[in-house]
Image (cartoon, helix red, strand yellow):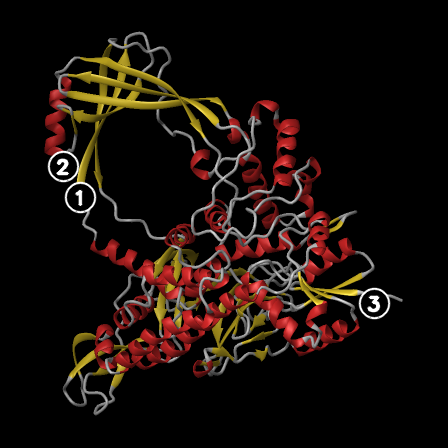
Amino acid sequence: MAKKSLVIVESPAKAKTINKYLGSDYEVAASVGHIIDLPKTKLGVSIEEGFKPQYVKIRGKEKIIKDLKARASKAEKVYLATDPDREGEAIAYHISTILQKDDDHVYRVEFNEITKNAVDEAMKHPRTIDMRRVYSQQARRVLDRIVGYKISPLLWQIIYRGLSAGRVQSVALRLICEREEEIRQFVPEEFWNIFALARPEGYDPFRVKLIKFDNKKIKISNEEEAQKHLAAIRAEAFKISSVQRKEVKRQAPPPFTTSTLQQVASRQLRMSTRRVMQIAQSLYEGVEIPGQGSVGLITYMRTDSTRISNVAIDAVRTYIKEAIGEDYLPARPKHYKSKKTAQDAHEAIRPTYISPEFTPEALKDKLSAEQFRLYDLIWKRFVACQMNPAIFEKTTVEVSGGKYLFAADGEVMKFPGFMKVYKEDSELNGNGDKLNIPLNLQEGLACELSELTPEQNFTKPPARYTESTLVKELDRLGIGRPSTYAQIVSTILQRKYVERKEQKLFATELGEAVNKILIKGFPDLFNVSFTAKMEEKLDEIAHNGATYEKVMQEFYEPFEQDLERIKKQKDELKSLIIEETDEVCEICGRPMVVRWGRNGKFLACSGYPECKNTRPLKKEEQEPEVTNEVCELCGAPMVIKHGRYGSFLACSNYPKCKNTKPLSIGVPCPREGCDGQIVERRTKRGRVFYGCSNYPKCDFMSWDKPVDKKCPQCGNPYMVEKNLKSKGHIYRCPNCKYEEPAD
């Protein structure tokens, strides 16, 4: 009996999908991601030996490694089919080193999409492991490890223990902090606009805006100037001085790359970039379709290319012609250029099957709500990219009188083109209260201006980054790569350097303190242009333009010099984040200063270490926040107050009524029939736990913070938050132990 061949992939879901395509001559196993990595407790890089990484087996992977080795020993050939990117190449190499299999019987294959044709074609063209890509990924991993392990201890000494610095994440933090500073420094300037209702004789009125005075762009700085212009305008006779009509074509956007998918999905679907990639991964690896088994629905989701295969173009053109209409199909296929820095290793993100039975609507009941929304977005964007442009007739009307010129723009869609299928959020919004420009307006027609409206405005500061705009900026600057964008954002959020409010990213006080130290201490390392150049160096390793040792040495020599310099400047760096106060130390009489600690800011004597006096920082008096809740004792509104153990609800009738109760975390009690809310409580020893507000009637409790999220595996009505060193911030089902990364 002939031996079977073994195919090793990363994910069990992917293994299941591929297994049905390969047949009985193959068996498919999953490594479940990395099997070896740098050690957690030490640097794990021998700098003296040419930056040699000291890899160790990942804790908990012993059983998987043993199983892979046993299967490989029985297999005739081993095909390493990990993800088709540099990280996947590195995982493939690491697996090959532990299999104890002759290299002549170990092959590397890549699946850009998980369909039968793609899998069969890939298996026909196996190759050896590309060590240039392995070394490129290794350089990234080792660089990040050196920066993190060498700089983080400095942050501990200057701010407090437990903080961390990241090579790329710290540059993203810098962008956010610099934007925060721009907003703080911004001084708004007043300006006024003047609008009017133009009424040509025999036509409906339409709104116009004053744009020029005496043939120059008008700028009105205050109300006094605005009133002077209004008086002069009322004295003038106006007419239609120009009517211009032209046809405008709006071209379809290119198919998605990782960056543009994260931007649009974050903006339109209100998903975090991390969640976008999780859902995209599930669509790529395979979704269970009744009668067909597990089916991969999109191509590989980590790509910076807009390239499309000829097979996919032929399929989508056939679909457009048959399902949408021949008028929407261009004479020739459309090809999009990728940006200059693109690796172009994979196609754009697109559906794997373009046919009526694989439309989003046809699969809606087979997908989760999030999968459907993301698949729908990817499908429509891809179909649209091969459709004719939308055509509008744009009309610009100018109304003049004396030295004043008013204008209005309007457009009418003549042909929807790609917009029949795909519109972005900016295109979904209508014109609000703007009036349409009448048809057939003629130049020279007398025009009365009525309802003159002066409108005061102020210039606005630059907008804070959202996840969408931060990814766009990182992509534009060449910082990070498709596989790293979501991780960059989630890392700075998880470290509490940045917080998300109403979709916007705000630098926290801690984030700004860390940023000050890093920029002052390492102005070149945490620099946008340096980080972008480092990405180019990593690309050079992958494309045989540089060696691993050379790139690492060029980085490390100046880095080591900076480290030595900073060690001598710790006191100077500490002064950047120490705030002077008017408080006096009651022990030695010296001034008190504000310092940082693990629990935030506190007052400390400036005479440290001779005097070690400290005390809590007085919180500024805060106005209690009124809630919709009513005190059950006296009927007065409840307000949110802040105490030493956090926020709580208190009666606004205090001190007459001293009723207080815990503040709900916004999660309903999961016990059947209970109408209570989950609240944060503390044990007698101060340990936080979560219980029902209806206690003692309901005795629900949890040591972990519940989240209002139904378990997708067993249907349990809630999951809990966990922060684990090995897995990071996750949600876990307390019933079946199912886990998934938290947004």
Picture disc at residue 180: none
Work out how far the residue at label 2 is from the one at label 3, CA to CA, in angstroms. 84 Å
> Which of the marked residues, 1 or 3, is nearer the chain's N terminus?
3
Res. 386 visible in picture: yes
Q: Nearer the viewer, residue 316 or 457?
A: 316
* Location of mark 1 (residue): 189
Is residue 75 toward the left or the right of residue 88 in the image?
right
Is residue 323 toward the left or the right of residue 535 in the image?
right
Helix, strand or loop at mark 1: loop
Q: Residues within 10 Å of mark 1 (few under 14, many from 20)?
A: few
> Which of the marked residues, 2 or 1, is nearer the chain's N terminus?
1
* Location of mark 3 (residue): 3
> Which of the marked residues, 2 or 3, is nearer the chain's N terminus?
3
From the image, state whether disc 2 or disc 3 is nearer to you.
Answer: 3
- The image quadrant of residue 68 is bottom right
Picture disc at residue 221: 2
Q: Position of residue 246 (x, y in %)?
A: 37, 19
Q: Position of residue 372 (x, y in %)?
A: 61, 46
Q: Are marks 1 and 3 in contact (CB under 8 Å)?
A: no
